[in-house]
Amino acid sequence: MSFEEQISLLSERVRSYSSTMETEEAVKTAVVLPFLRALGYDVFDPSEVVPEFTADAVGKKGEKVDYAIKIDGEVRILIECKPITTNLDRVHLAQLFRYFTVTSAKFAILTNGRTWHFHTDLEEPNKLDARPFLSFDLSDFQQHVVSELRKFARSDFDVDGILASAERLKYTSSLKSAILEIIENPPEDFVRIAARGLYEGKFTSSVKDQFTSLVRSAFREVIRDSVKSRISSALDDNDQPTEATPAPVEDEIITTEEEIEGYMIVKSIVREVIAVNRVGMRDAKSYCAILVDNNNRKPLARLHFNRSIKYVGLFDKDTEERVQIDSLDGIYAISERLKETAQRYAD
């Protein structure tokens, strides 16, 4: 089985069984060790994958890091695991900070099984960066991450090669976050620049609010048009029908552009209350579910967009309540109810 196939299986495992991985030990057994094995490390060799690693020089009696990965007898990777329900934060890096300084490790991984943060020392030699250079959600695994993870494989492990791409990854990730923030909350200066030439009157508060909303909508349309263009191009390039082409399956689950955009709107609303990497989407035949921690018992909303009349299912009460919306912008009118639901899962 290829590395990519093994990671895909782990991704499916996190999606399907996250509710049963509420302890740190469960995360280690079900996800972390299989992940290391997929990278080619012998998880049964304690001289290579060292569990409960202790460095005497740390000075913290009894303090341990969950795993240390040794390559050619030298510690190269430190791993700290947390329960899958943990919202990873800088405070959880404390042990990795100390151990990174007193060992020969070049990389540190903090994970709760679903979220993975890869750190190194780009900013100051031998001092772990607080900001990861690579982060991803294993339950919503993206193909481009595979090539980056391959660099950590036992057979291809190359410190210089990883560091060469780590800086690019780190700043690209930060820029993506900054761009997303601008898209969701356009700053006034940006709105003024965008409105220049379109509005010549006094830029009052009401005008600013109006153009902020328009800029936000324009951003979404640009992204949507770009996605459509890429999909159309890909279809044109591969449009070679043959007699063997199977007929479409009538009951196939198809995630529509409206569902994707609705999901993104909900994420942008609740990001003030809950970490966005905890919010995911799971499509079904009759509705598209938006869940917290990919857990059916933590529903945030349901998008009933498969009919001419659109509804959003809300869960701030004991049972689902469907609210009709005329357009996707109608989701903003129920922002407070979505935030109230998200608050239940925030801790």
Image (spheres, rainbow, N blue to C red):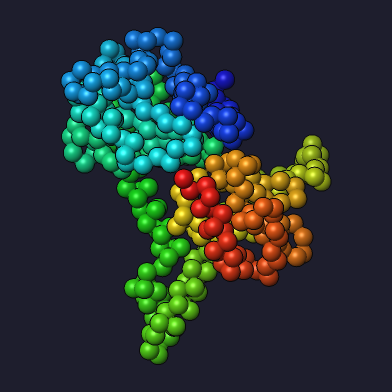
Q: Indicate whether 164 appears above or below 271.
A: above
Residue 126 location in percent, x, y? 19, 31
From this view, report whether residue 221 is shown above or below residue 290: below
Identify the residue at the far bottom of this view. 201
Q: Nearer the viewer, residue 70 or 205?
A: 205
Q: Residue 341 at x, y = what percent?
A: 56, 54
Give the residue displayed 36% in from the left and 73% down from the top. 188
The residue lying toward the viewer, choosing from 311 and 5, is 311
Q: Check the image and report above or below for 307 versus 100.
A: below
- Side of 290 where 206 appears, left or right: left
Decide if residue 15 is in sight here: yes
Number of marks drawn: 0
Residue at (27%, 12%) from the top-left corner? 73
Percent position of residue 283, x then y = 67, 46
Q: Quadrant of residue 147?
A: top left
In the image, 297 versus 215, the foreground residue is: 297
Q: Picture coordinates of residue 130 (x, y %)?
A: 28, 41
* Residue at the (45%, 57%) spot, across then down: 272
Q: Residue furthest front?
A: 318
**Residue plotted at (36% across, 42% down):** 89
211 or 229, which lies in front?
211
Left or right of residue 136: residue 290: right
From where the camera sits, is residue 227 visible? no
- In the rendered image, the vertical position of residue 40 relative to residue 290, given as above or below: above
Q: Is residue 52 left or right of residue 12?
A: left
Quadrant that contains the N terminus: top right
- The quarter of the displayed image where residue 323 is located: bottom right
